[in-house]
Image (spheres, coloured by chain):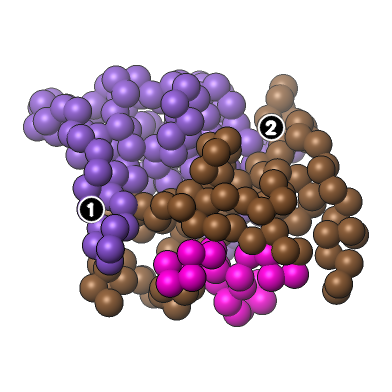
Chain colours: A brown, B purple
Amino acid sequence: MSWLDEVPWGKDGLIAVVTQDFSSQRVLTVAWMNREALEKTVQTSQATYWSRSRQRLWRKGEESGNVQQVREVRIDCDSDAILLKVEQTGGIACHTGRASCFYRKLENGNWIEVDPVLKDPSLIYRKK
Amino acid sequence: MSWLDEVPWGKDGLIAVVTQDFSSQRVLTVAWMNREALEKTVQTSQATYWSRSRQRLWRKGEESGNVQQVREVRIDCDSDAILLKVEQTGGIACHTGRASCFYRKLENGNWIEVDPVLKDPSLIYRKK
């Protein structure tokens, strides 16, 4: 499909993806997609990424149930990054049980945890 | 400095950086930093990136004047992405003269420009 062809997939075939909460506007995650992941994300309206560590497609929430319903897909001026606006099921995007993966803030030369754990990860991933 | 050492700089020495407008919460850009860029950004409270195309440090706004005053620096759970919250001087982050680089939205299989040009780029970069 032509809109997929407009992404210069590069040598590793991946594009950086910023995912933002549609309601709170918090930045939730930075992840990666290959062509298949982006196509699947748009077809299903559920965010699917490429897991670089596991080297496979990964539908966000496939284990935890915390899926991301896609409300908007944007691309940047040089077509090397995607912005997804999503409704985050469960209000938890991070595997640590927090709303966002960006829960550490630089304060006086230290990365400080500033956001609460909303749910114990052992309860989120109990099916493992 | 230890907070810099906590970033796993990887083989290319770069980390992905999402920059978000502190007031509007819009995601403005995705760019890259090396260790020196991140250090400089924190020291000066002005966003400095690593330009992959030009292979040099690049203080955002050095030509256009549209500098980014850094209000907050966050890092994600696996320390491979940075989130900057900034005040965007001039309200323009994109070299096309738009507020954000993410001005194209996927609609019915097409990337559609949905945000206005706020200033003619030839006026932004007239010093060139």
Q: Chain of mark 1?
A: B
Residue behind mark 2: A105
**Boundaries of the magenta span:** A41-63
Q: Are marks 1 and 2 in contact (CB under 8 Å)?
A: no
Residue A40 to residue A91: above or below? below
**Placement of the N terminus of chain B among the 4 image quadrants:** top right
User: Which residue in the protein does label 1 denote?
Assistant: B112
Relative to residue A73, is residue A127 drawn left or right? right
Instruction: Please indicate, yes or no, whether residue A74 appears anywhere in the rendered image.
Output: yes
Q: Is residue A43 magenta?
A: yes
Residue shown at 25%/38% (left/top)?
B115
**Quadrant location of residue B91?**
top left
Amino acid at pointer 2: Lys
Say what secondary structure mark 1 lies in: strand
Quadrant where the C terminus of chain B is found in the figure? top left
Between A86 and A5, the residue placed more toward the observer is A86
Residue B114 versus residue A47 in the image, above or below: above
Q: Are marks 1 and 2 on the same chain?
A: no
Is residue B1 rendered to the left or right of residue B28? right
Q: Position of residue B64 (x, y in %)?
A: 23, 26
Dot 1 surroundings within 10 Å: few (below 14), some, or many (20 or more)? some
For disc 2, the chain is A
Location of residue B128 with respect to A42 vertically, above or below = above
Vertical placement of A123 versus B83: above or below? below
Q: Is residue B55 visible?
A: no
Locate residue B52 relative to residue B8 in the image: left or right.
Answer: left
Q: Residue at point 28% right, 54% down? A: A78
Residue A20, image x, y percentages: 53, 45
